[in-house]
Amino acid sequence: MSEKSAAIRAEALESLLVEKGLLDAARIDDVLTLYNERVGPMNGAMLVAKAWRDVEFKQQLLADGTAAIAQFAFEGGQVDKLVVVENTAEVHNVVVCTLCSCYPWAVLGLPPKWYKDPAYRSRVVREPRAVLTDFGTHLPAEQEVRVWDSSAEVRYMVLPVQPKGWETLSEDELVNKITRDSMIGVEVLAEVAE
Amino acid sequence: MSEKSAAIRAEALESLLVEKGLLDAARIDDVLTLYNERVGPMNGAMLVAKAWRDVEFKQQLLADGTAAIAQFAFEGGQVDKLVVVENTAEVHNVVVCTLCSCYPWAVLGLPPKWYKDPAYRSRVVREPRAVLTDFGTHLPAEQEVRVWDSSAEVRYMVLPVQPKGWETLSEDELVNKITRDSMIGVEVLAEVAE
Amino acid sequence: MDGIHDLGGKQGFGNVELDASSIEKRHIHGFNERWHAAVFTIMNSLFAHGAAANTDHFRHSVERIDPINYLSDGYYGRWLGGAETMLVEAGLLTQDEVNNRVLSKGHKVAEPIAARPAEQSPTFAPRSAAYHPTAQREPLANPIFAIGDNVVAHSLGGTGHTRLPSYVRGISGQIIAAHGAWVFPDANAHGHGEAPKHLYTVRYQGADLWGPNAEESVVLNIDLFEPYLELAQ
Amino acid sequence: MDGIHDLGGKQGFGNVELDASSIEKRHIHGFNERWHAAVFTIMNSLFAHGAAANTDHFRHSVERIDPINYLSDGYYGRWLGGAETMLVEAGLLTQDEVNNRVLSKGHKVAEPIAARPAEQSPTFAPRSAAYHPTAQREPLANPIFAIGDNVVAHSLGGTGHTRLPSYVRGISGQIIAAHGAWVFPDANAHGHGEAPKHLYTVRYQGADLWGPNAEESVVLNIDLFEPYLELAQ
């Protein structure tokens, strides 16, 4: 089914359900507003920035991610339990859901298309190093790669390594530089030459 | 790709190869003649009929199918080694190739479409009794089902049980009554009420 | 079920196609299309009107989509297929209603739709009155395994929903975390109650999963429910 | 490779669609369409012109077809995809030539074609001068296993051709027949020679393969090459 066909089919179902009183079309606008404006990777980036600046928060985030983020009352769901895994010089973490497309919506927003497509889901558990090169990410052979397959209701987020030179940036400045992909684990943050 | 699209695509490739001298279109007619006229399940049916009437041939067919059929010089290929497995009251055999669609062309002809489709290939190794009911074949619970997955170059053919009442038929009469499906193992032959 | 959705470790799906956010390395988020949000909202309405009893029930409806459609339809297309299935099975819409409306919107007749394998619609108990913000529950028993145990997972068989992917089955791994008891998807998807089971993170070595040609120094962590596991010999 | 072709035991593919011969219980045989025979003959020409080095090489070209096409194209459509791949990889045709000719025949531009994953085209040694009517060969060594041995099969890994389906891996079975030594597909498909290996028929119990919900009294026999096997513990 092409995107166009699916769009028509969705429109058909929407109109039927509205007629039958099973769907309030206004709720579609609410959902658009929620995920377009309030739920997105800026939430996760804020957590990462804070963890880089506040060692106590970082320890709490790594020890019990669910408790650490409770104060922010993120919307968006899909995070019954949050586990934050830390990248280091020795270990690089990367997250997937091979059986469907589980993803920590509340902190990263809606998952990118590639996260939900068969290529990523099939390959990243088997050849994560090769998959990361699709993203331009080349890991040293001696760095261990840890793949997390989110097969239950625990959700995983990666705490990336802070690049050299970012120590002087404010948390607000960091939020725009900490990418979604670095928190999924398919990118290693680096200072971009400007 | 629909059948129509595939047909167009095949026509394109055929015309290109003929132009380049890589394909002689007359060979297509030879292939049609070979498989439409000389290679088909009547060859296997002839073996089964003969086995039912000639106990010595039956023993040879079951002991070394390859040697037993050598005298007939069947065309059509795909039978490096033939193993004939006998159905009895205790055991029912059924043949598949889960990885592609290997089939004993020389004795059964070209495989039916369903033999090559995902439904049969995926299901018959896991739930052969359920698959056989798709064919209207219901096996007694106490009869063991033996599935043969043709994963190498050995090819399998089933020697069906002769129905009661067929003992007086000639080999020629039997050939038209012994079905392809009974030699794949998805059918149990039975005298049809006429 | 051992369905097309069980993609982990399968080969032949080509390279990852990056989105604009990955390429431009900046935050781009939200819905790409309005109809994606419509499907998202329809999915919410399934839960509101009881057509989807719970998340596990909904996930299984997506797994039951025809395999070609599963691979072709994209994420929101798959949700749409699952939603249609659940609405029809719940008796809230008929298949004819859906098909006729699709045709009236200009859809081609020949377009394949999500298949709906015949399944006895399970009966779900009314939701518990207790408010559960998550799928974590009080355990019904003590955990059988402990961190450090070596375990092997085996399929429970059958045609139902499960969260044990095939690629880890039969391979020895080590428990590295215990998460307490959680709603058991294999039961919950089919109206057999929440049946809480202990959940563990199990770590596998890449070479154990993928053989001698595995990438070096790769480990795989996955969350598995206790009924899938036994101690490795 | 663990590709889409490895269908044994997968669920969700629906019921078997019988053909006229099955329904009418009479002999109907031969090609349904002329183009099926054309593809069959093209496949023969691949061997005649060296584009396909051997059957294993050809089979692998079919396995490499894009998964959606593999499920959609039907048997002769899959052969066609494999044939195109081999003709292009052998340099006998260019992809542009094929595409342009397809368009000139009235094909839609958007129609997907068989994917051709980039693969280093292997170099095949010229065929042996010896005439081999079958793929059976003189053994290079004595067989390691004997009838009655309990064995377990494991994937050799990698991305290449193999004849070990995933559904028997890691499960204990018993050798019930020994067939001598045969050309080893895992090597032969990739230009690594015929490397003959001993071949056995291994018998598995249905309940061992499919768990507690398996059908009763079912056994599965499959032909497996010696390098896949080790003695069960």
Image (cartoon, coloured by chain):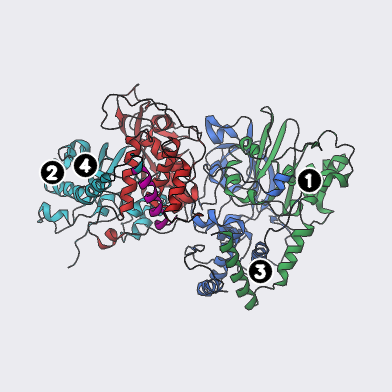
Chain colours: A cyan, B green, C red, D blue
Count residues near mark 4 (Cα–Cα under 10 Å), then give few for <14, some for 14-19, many for 20+.
Answer: some
Residue A158: give x, y in percent of width and height. Answer: 25, 47
Instruction: Between residue A109 and residue A151, name the one nearer to us.
Output: A109
Closer to us: mark 2 or mark 4?
4
Q: Which residue is mark 2?
A: A55
Badge number at residue D45:
3
Badge number at residue B64:
1
Type of amino acid at the residue the image marks with label 4: Glu
Residue C38: give x, y in percent of width and height. Answer: 32, 48
Residue C127 vertical position relative to residue A92 in the rendered view, above or below: above
Q: Is residue C152 visible?
A: yes
Pointer 1 chain: B
Q: Which residues are magenta?
A: A1-18
Residue D15: give x, y in percent of width and height. Answer: 58, 42
Quadrant of the image for the C terminus of chain D?
Answer: top right
1 and 4 marks on the same chain: no
Q: Residue furthest top?
A: C141
Count residues near mark 3 (Cα–Cα under 10 Å), then give few for <14, some for 14-19, many for 20+.
Answer: some
Badge number at residue A75:
4
Secondary structure state at the residue bearing disc 4: loop
Instruction: Between residue B107 and residue D18, name the one nearer to us.
Output: D18
Left or right position of B181 against A36: right
